[in-house]
Image: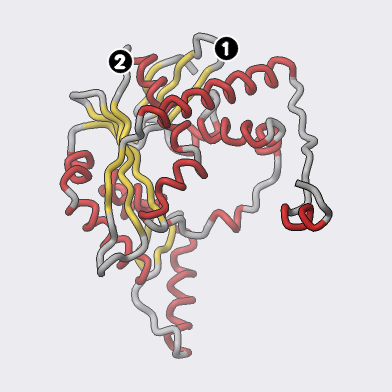
Amino acid sequence: MEPGIYHDISNEEYHSGAGVSKSQLDDVAVNPAIFPWKKTAPVDDEKLKALDMGTALHCLLLEPDEFSKRFIKAPEFNRRTTDGKEREKQFLKDCEDTGKTVMDFEQHRKLSLMQGSAMAYPPARWLLEADGYTESSFYWQDDETGELCRCRPDKYLRARPVIADVKKVADMDRFARHIEEFRYHVQDAMYRDGFYQIFNEYPLFVFIAVSETIDCGRYPVRVFELDTEDMAEGHRLYRRDLNTFHECRTSNAWGGIEKIQRPAWARKQDGFQ
C-alpha cells in the first residue's frame, strides 16, 4: 500500500489490510501479544450480527444515502402476542439473505431522534453538512520507525484542515472519562499526524459527541476539541506504542506473560499496601 489518501477502500478492506492503526496500538498498549493473536484467532460470526448502534449512527450522520443499503427498519411488532412474535420471526427470516443489518422499530426511532438532535446543534450540523470526504483511508510512512501507518477519519473537510469524528456516548457527563478509557487523545495524535504527513499541516481535530441517554427529553450533542496538555499526552503515548510495535515486529518477539494481583481490598486485608 503506497502512502496517500484512498477514497474507494471499503471498511472491510481497510481493517484487514496493511498498516498499523490506532486500535491496534491500543492492543499493543495493553499487551503486544494481542496484536498477532487478533490476526489469527477465530471469530464467532454470530456475535458480529448484532446491531451496533454506534455504527448505525455513523452511517446515518455521515453517509445518510448509504443507510438504507446497509440497514433494514423493522415494523413495530407486538411481542406480547403469538401473532406478533410469529410475524417478527417471519420478517427476520425474510431479511436473512439481504446482507443488511435489521434494526428494530424502537432502535430506529431512537436513532432518528439522535440524528435530529445532532442536526439541531449548530456546530455539529455545520461539520456534518460541510463539503468534505467521509470514510477515506490515509496511509503514511512513519519517519522514525519506517512503519506503514493508517487511519480512517469519519470526515475531513475539503476547503480547510479539519477532521470531525462522531462518537456515540452513553452519557455526555462521562465523555471526559471516555477520552481516557478509549484513548481518544491517542486517536487525536495519530490522525493529526497522518493528516500532516499528507497535507504538510496539522488539522483541527474535533469530536461530535451524541448521547444515547435522554436529558430533559432530548439527546444531548456537543462538539469538543482536546486541550493542549491532553493533546501532548496523546502524542507521547502514540509514539511510545508505535515504537513498541516496531520493536516487536522487527524482532518477532511479542511477549505475552503478564503479572496479575488480587483485588486491592484483598491485599489490604493481608497487610499489603
Looking at the rendered structure, the kind of residue marked 2 is Glu
Residue that protrudes farthest toward the right in the picture:
270
Is residue 105 placed above or below 146 in the rendered structure? below
Left or right side of 57 for 79: right
| Residue tagged 2 | 201
Please tell me which residue is depicted at 47% across the width and 28% down the height of the picture.
233
Please tell me which residue is depicted at 65% across the width and 53% down the height of the picture.
44
Question: How far apart are the two marked residues, 2 and 1, measured between alpha carbons?
Answer: 21 Å
Q: Secondary structure at mark 2?
A: loop
Q: Quadrant of residue 72?
A: bottom left
The image shows residue 128 at horizontal and vertical percentages of 22, 42
Please tell me which residue is depicted at 40% across the width and 49% down the height of the picture.
175
Is residue 127 placed above or below 8 in the rendered structure? below
The image shows residue 24 at horizontal and vertical percentages of 57, 33
Q: Quadrant of residue 41?
A: top right
Q: Earlier in the sequence, mark 2 or mark 1?
A: 1
Work out whether residue 35 or residue 227 is closer to the camera in this orientation and state it.
227
Left or right side of 210 for 101: right
Q: Which mark is residue 168?
A: none
Is residue 92 placed above or below 169 in the rendered structure? below
Work out whether residue 221 or residue 198 is closer to the camera in this orientation and state it.
221
The image shows residue 109 at horizontal and vertical percentages of 30, 67
Q: How many marks?
A: 2
The image shows residue 47 at horizontal and vertical percentages of 59, 57
Please tell me which residue is depicted at 35% across the width and 52% down the height of the picture.
57
Crowdedness near tag 1: few (<14), some (14–19) or many (≥20) residues, C-alpha within 10 Å: some
| Residue tagged 1 | 145
